[in-house]
Structure formats: C-alpha cells, structure tokens
Amino acid sequence: MAQLPSPDDLLILLTVARLGRFNAVAETLGTTHTTISRRILALDRQLGGRTLERTPHGWELTELGASAVAAAERIEETLGLLAAATSQDRDALSGMVRISTSDGFGAEFVTPALVRLQQRHPMLNVEMLSATRRVSQNRSGVDLEVVVGRTDVSNAQAIFLTNYFLRLYASPAYAAERGLPETPDGVRQHGFVSYVESALQVAELGHRSSQLPMPRSSFQATSIFAQVEAVRRGAGIGLLPNFMVARNPEFVPVLADAFQRQVPIWAVARPESLRSARVQAVIGALQQEVAVRQDLLAA
C-alpha cells in the first residue's frame, strides 16, 4: 500500500502557498525555517516530486504542489467543520492571519475592523505589519496586503476598498503667525510637511508628484503620524490624509477649493489566501468598516 502524505505536511504546504516565505510560515506556526524546509522535503518524497519551485517572486507551487494544496484545503475545511461542531460558537474562526497595511489607514480603519472581528472570533490571532508601499511583486510573507495607489500585479487579486483624499492642512497657530497661501504657487513661501521622497514607494503620497512648487523648507518623515504631529506643532503646511485630521480643530484646511488628490486603497491577496475563511472574514470586516465610516473618508 502506497504511503499517504502527512496531513500536517500538507497543511504546512498550504501555509507556504499563502505566505510564500518559509520564515513567515515558521513564525505563524511557531516553529523554525529549518523545520518547515524539512517538512516540505519530506512531503516531496512522499508525493514523488517537487511541490514548490523558487522564482524571482518567491516560492511558487508546481503542478503537483497545486494538487497537494487542493487536498490540504479540503483537510483544513474538514478540520474547521469539526472544530465548529465541538465549539459553542459554530461560526468560530481560528488560527493566524497576517496583514500588511499602510500605517495611517491601518490605525484608523484596519485596526478597529480587526479588533471587532477578533472579539467575535476569540480564537483568531492577528499580526498586522505597517508598510506604506505598492503591492509587492514578490511573495510578501502575509495573507493580505492593504495597499495604496495602483495595483500592477498579475499573480494576485486586488479588491477595491475605498478612495480617500490627500489635502493640505496647517495648525491654527501656524496660520495666525505665517498666514496661509491663497493660490498653490504661494506654497513656496511656507514650510512643507510630507513623506521622505527618497524612501517613498507610493509617489502619489509625496510632494514631488503633487505639482506644488518647492517650499521654503521641508519636514519629511516616513511615518504619517510624525507628519501629523509636525503639522500640529507648526512645522508648516502638510499633505495629509483627510480621514486623519479633517474633523480635528487643531488643523485648518489650506487651499480647500484649489487642491486635493484622490487615492485608492486596495486589499490584495493570492488565490490561495483568498480561499481561506480567515482572509475572507478580514476582507468582509474591512469592507464593513469602510462602508459605515464613508462620511469620514469624504470629509
């Protein structure tokens, strides 16, 4: 009788297919990179061929690997049904979900959505990584990426979440002391707060692509929270997400009728991740959070 592949090894392969990096898989499963590699090699021997191949984008499934992952998904679904049958909460989700998101949107929208989801499903574990970037062409080590701007990627699915606006703001004290420009050209007489251009992956978020003139001085930071604080303390006029400051009396709009930039937010995942009940639940929670707070995004 032929030896059956190990269900544990199949589930490890499924996690590799979703995350794409052995280190990320090891962290998720509470083991080591070496153990993951050894278990995949053992599975390859059991199946009589390679399940993964290394590409410039990270580990990708072979044809044999895709068949093995399909079997692993059925095992995962069966185990989920068993767990639900023995739980008081028959809709309970469990396990780890890893998400990458920009820091501002992550704090204001992703975090409350995930906290509420976790409150409904206490066995769900969340890892949220802050990264303001375009969607990764390489395997990113996360189940789901929440990204800003265009999504030029062919090996994943992009799900539109919402648009928000970048607008210009200053503090009341700065406006009283320095005055505010009446035209975009007047920005050149002021300090300006924005992202560090040399470290910025999403050009739409920076001053350089705004078509605004070069300012008198600049305060650049990789953290949007540092930018917000710099504007609040009078460093200059800031190019900030509307949802972070629009209703805060410590910030006044600048050139409200003359300048704004609309920016899209997407949830991006590989097909293997999108078939995960955890990832589907996270996407649903994000869509609900955006829907109920759409007035803030349009403010």
Image (cartoon, rainbow, N blue to C red):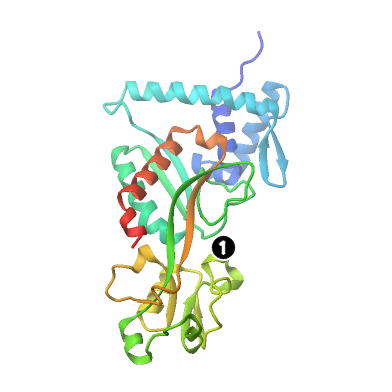
Residue 70 percent coordinates (x, y): 57, 24
The answer to whether 187 appears left or right of 41 in the picture is left
Query: Residue flagged by tag 1: what amino acid is it?
Result: Val
Q: Nearer the viewer, residue 151 or 21?
A: 151
Residue 104 percent coordinates (x, y): 42, 62
Q: In which image quadrant can residue 62 be found?
A: top right
Q: Is residue 3 above or below residue 242?
A: above
Residue 101 in view of the camera? no
Q: Nearer the viewer, residue 97 or 295?
A: 295
Count of numbered marks: 1
Which residue is located at x 50 percent, y 32 percent? 275
Which residue occupies the extreme top position in the image?
1
Q: In which image quadrant can residue 176 be found?
A: bottom left
Q: In which image quadrant can residue 94 be found?
A: top left
Q: Residues within 10 Å of mark 1 (few under 14, many from 20)?
A: some
Which residue is located at x 50 percent, y 39 percent? 29
Residue 32 percent coordinates (x, y): 57, 43
Q: Which residue is mark 1?
A: 202
The answer to whether 143 appears left or right of 174 in the picture is right
